[in-house]
């Protein structure tokens, strides 16, 4: 079950960082042109977009591990999960920076479902 209150709080924090960063940037660049302001904003929004995408993607499969004697297992098949790296997408920011969104998760070798460890 997704705790929407907690998620919204976390995402509000993330947006707040972006907004604050933008305000600071503007203060440091009082002579910026509209185009420069737009580029600075786009760069920050792209970063926010990447973070929200990653976290939202991770939430969709946030079923808890079901520990057995030998590690996490599929709750449906009771088969031990195989560890794999999860990459929703590599994002290229306007500044040419690549964001690698990767997290370890487990896949059931029997039914193919993916599970993220809690937390
Ligand atoms: Zn399974």
Image: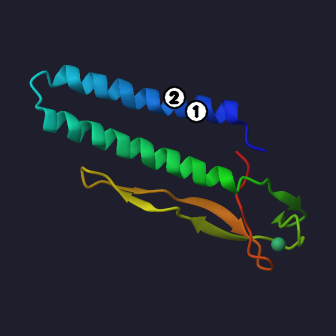
Residue sitting farthest toward the bottom = 110
Q: What residue do we see at 30% from left, 28% from top?
A: 22
Q: Nearer the viewer, residue 101 or 39?
A: 39
Classify residue 108 by image quadrant: bottom right
Crowding at dot 1, Cα within 10 Å, few <14 / some 14-19 / many 20+, comes out as some
Give residue 63's position: percent from left, percent from top: 77, 54
Q: Is residue 50 above or below residue 29?
A: below
Residue behind mark 2: 13
Q: Is residue 61 above or below residue 34?
A: below
Classify residue 103 by image quadrant: bottom right
Give residue 9's position: percent from left, percent from top: 60, 28
Q: What residue do we see at 26% from left, 51% from top?
A: 94
Q: Secondary structure at mark 2?
A: helix
User: Dots 2 and 1: beta carbons under 8 Å?
Assistant: yes
What's the distance in space between the residues labelled 2 and 1, CA to CA?
A: 5 Å
Give residue 26's position: percent from left, percent from top: 22, 24
Q: Is mark 1 within 8 Å of ligand 1?
A: no
Q: Quadrant of ligand 1?
A: bottom right
Q: What residue do we see at 83% from left, 67% from top?
A: 74
Crowding at dot 2, Cα within 10 Å, few <14 / some 14-19 / many 20+, comes out as few
Give residue 75's position: percent from left, percent from top: 87, 64
**Rendered image coloring scheme:** rainbow
Q: Secondary structure at mark 1?
A: helix
Q: Is mark 2 within 8 Å of ligand 1?
A: no
Residue 25 as seen in the image, left or right of residue 55: left
Q: What residue do we see at 79% from left, 53% from top?
A: 64
Residue behind mark 1: 10
Q: Quadrant of the C terminus?
A: top right
Q: Quadrant of the N terminus?
A: top right
């Amino acid at each position: 079950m997704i705790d929407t209150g907690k998620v919204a709080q976390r995402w509000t924090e993330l947006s707040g960082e972006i907004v604050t960063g933008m305000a600071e940037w503007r203060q440091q660049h009082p002579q910026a042109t509209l185009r420069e302001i737009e580029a600075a904003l786009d760069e920050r929004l792209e970063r926010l977009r990447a973070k929200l995408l990653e976290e939202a993607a991770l939430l969709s499969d946030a079923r808890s591990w079901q520990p057995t004697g030998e590690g996490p297992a599929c709750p449906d098949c009771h088969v031990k999960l195989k560890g794999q790296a999860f990459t929703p997408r590599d994002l290229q920011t306007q500044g040419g920076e690549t964001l690698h969104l990767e997290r370890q998760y487990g896949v059931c070798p029997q039914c193919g479902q993916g599970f993220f460890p809690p937390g």
